Image: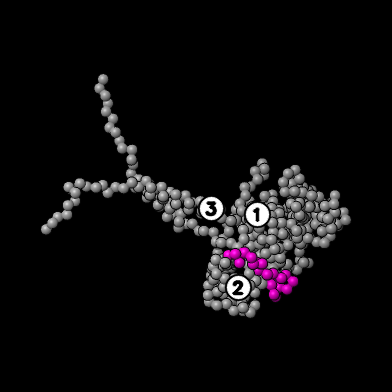
Amino acid sequence: MPKVKIPRKSTTIDMTAMCDVAFLLLTFFMLTTKFRPPEPMTVDTPSSIVSMPKPDKNMILLTMKDNRVFLDVDQQQVRVQALEMMGEKYGVKFTKQEEVVFSNLGTFGAPMANMKQLLSAGPGDRDALSAQMPGVPRDTANFDKCELFDWILFIRQIKQSNENDVKIAIRGDVKTPYSTVKNVIDILQKQNLNQFSFVTDLEAKPSTLNK
Amino acid sequence: MAEINTGGGKKVSTRIDLTPMVDLGFLLVTFFMVTTTFSKPNVMELAMPDKTEDPSKITPVKESRAITLIIGEKDRVYYYHGTGQDPENTKVETAYFSGEKSIRKVILKHKADVMSNPNLTAKEREPIILIKPDSKCTFRNVVDVLDEMKICDIGIYAIVDLSAPEKEMIKNVKEE
């Protein structure tokens, strides 16, 4: 019987196309990745079934853990202006250098008395120092001297002059006592801010209700 | 002029093996995929009752429509029907976040009761829930109770301060 000759084929394939795909994906992920900004403390947020994504812009984020309240706001320009206004009220003068540091600081919880110390610290020590801060001081008995009240008020004034409406998001650790939450809510309500939102993780809706 | 000897004119292939480069590419892709934060946080909106409003303009709540939930310590919720106008004759009961005596069952039962209550007009057949967190309860419990409002589809609810007689009421429940 005559044999059928099968020509041997090479097992090596052209890798160029695969390489192209790999690097295309790599570029995509590199450009879209946003690393999580450093936080002075880890916060475990409670979960809920609501699925409304948190807006990124024009947002004052209040982070609560234990008895401390930390504050964060977007837009560097707004941060610098708010710092200047706070410095004026509490008698602290900041240099240009310190203002730049503050505009990139992210979440902070320093009282005005310690703010200069925090901003003049070296970049290596700042994170550790920021974590030790007692939080933005709040005094619900005397709103005139309540730093948290003033921060929120000044930021709102600045944002409003830029014709931006600011929203308040409260991000609390699961173990935060309600007394802290109530304190924050009282401060917001004193400014007639009756609408705000809680930051939560997504959780599945219980299936028992679909009956 | 001297010519450069190219080695007998033998052509060297310009193709190189791209396999290691592909390996490296996918390794980095995997790294960036893993580090990308997929879960964007969500927000739960909350509207507090306006404190500046004139109290005399607020319409009184019909006792039979309302249920009061007091969020206490150690994942407990104390509840009673009505708004606590008569603390002496109000029966306070305890519920939990899961299990047989879960707060969801209490809310759903109350909702069903209100919706089928013959003493109420059709317009009034909607439950009202007052949430009163104790100063020692955790933020998790507050969010959990607010979440129950969403789960049970309760339209009217509000966070109200805990009053002094109510603090006494939950103290007595604890002793039982």
Name the residue: 82% across, 55% down.
Answer: B170
User: Which chain letter goes with mark 3?
Assistant: B
Q: CA distance from mark 1 to mark 3?
A: 18 Å
Residue annotated with mark 1: A46
Tag 2 near tag 1, CB within 8 Å? no
Residue annotated with mark 2: A117
Q: Write down the region rendered in magenta.
A: A127-146
Mark 3 against mark 2, which lies toward the viewer? 2
Q: Residue furthest right?
A: B88
Q: CA distance from mark 3 to mark 2?
A: 36 Å
Secondary element at tag 1: loop
Residue annotated with mark 3: B38
Q: Nearer the viewer, residue B47 or A190?
A: A190
Q: Nearer the viewer, residue A127 or A144?
A: A127
Tag 2: Cα neighbours inside 10 Å, few (<14), some, or many (≥20)? few
Whether residue A130 is in magenta: the answer is: yes
User: Which chain letter goes with mark 2?
Assistant: A
